[in-house]
Amino acid sequence: ELLKASKIGIVSSLLDKLIYLIHKGEPKFAIGVNEVRDAVTNRSIEFLIYSNSILEKINENEFIDLLNTSETIGGKIYGVDASTDIGLRISSLGGIVGLLRFAIR
């Protein structure tokens, strides 16, 4: 119960939900910088998860703007270390993923 409420438990649960959405073909997710940026622009981002490996793919100022905008529209943001199991999974998905309030595709 304690692990379930922890950050790692929440992120693990969100990642499981992302995999489920992909498997079911429900387009309420965004994978990679471009899709997440579009989701934030369309105000559909609900949860944003990133690993620190994302800074290899995107300019730091642009990344900070993306996080700030996401937070402004009510998105919950979780960052994970790329050296952890969950961080490696996020990194393999482009370093950044999002679960959406509504589909944008």
Image (cartoon, helix red, strand yellow):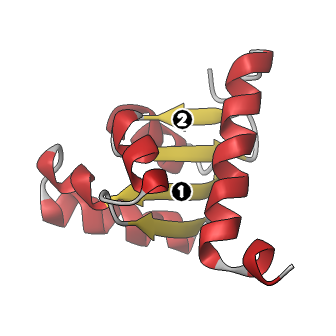
* Residue at 25% from the left image edge and 51% from the top image edge: 54
Would you identify the image quadrant in which residue 91 lies? Answer: top left
Vertical arrangement, residue 79 with respect to residue 33, above or below = below
Helix, strand or loop at label 2? It is strand
User: Given the image, on which type of amino acid does mark 1 rest?
Assistant: Leu
**Which mark identifies residue 30?**
2
Residue 51 percent coordinates (x, y): 35, 57
> Would you say 49 lies left or right of 12 here?
left
> Would you say 54 lies left or right of 48 here?
left
Residue where numbered disc 1 is placed: 48
* Residue at 16% from the left image edge and 66% from the top image edge: 61
- Of the two numbered discs 1 and 2 on the same chain, state the one appearing first in sequence: 2
* Residue at 53% from the left image edge and 56% from the top image edge: 48
In front here: 42 or 85?
85
Give the position of the C terminus as an image quadrant: top right
Residue 92 percent coordinates (x, y): 36, 35
Q: Are marks 1 and 2 in contact (CB under 8 Å)?
A: no
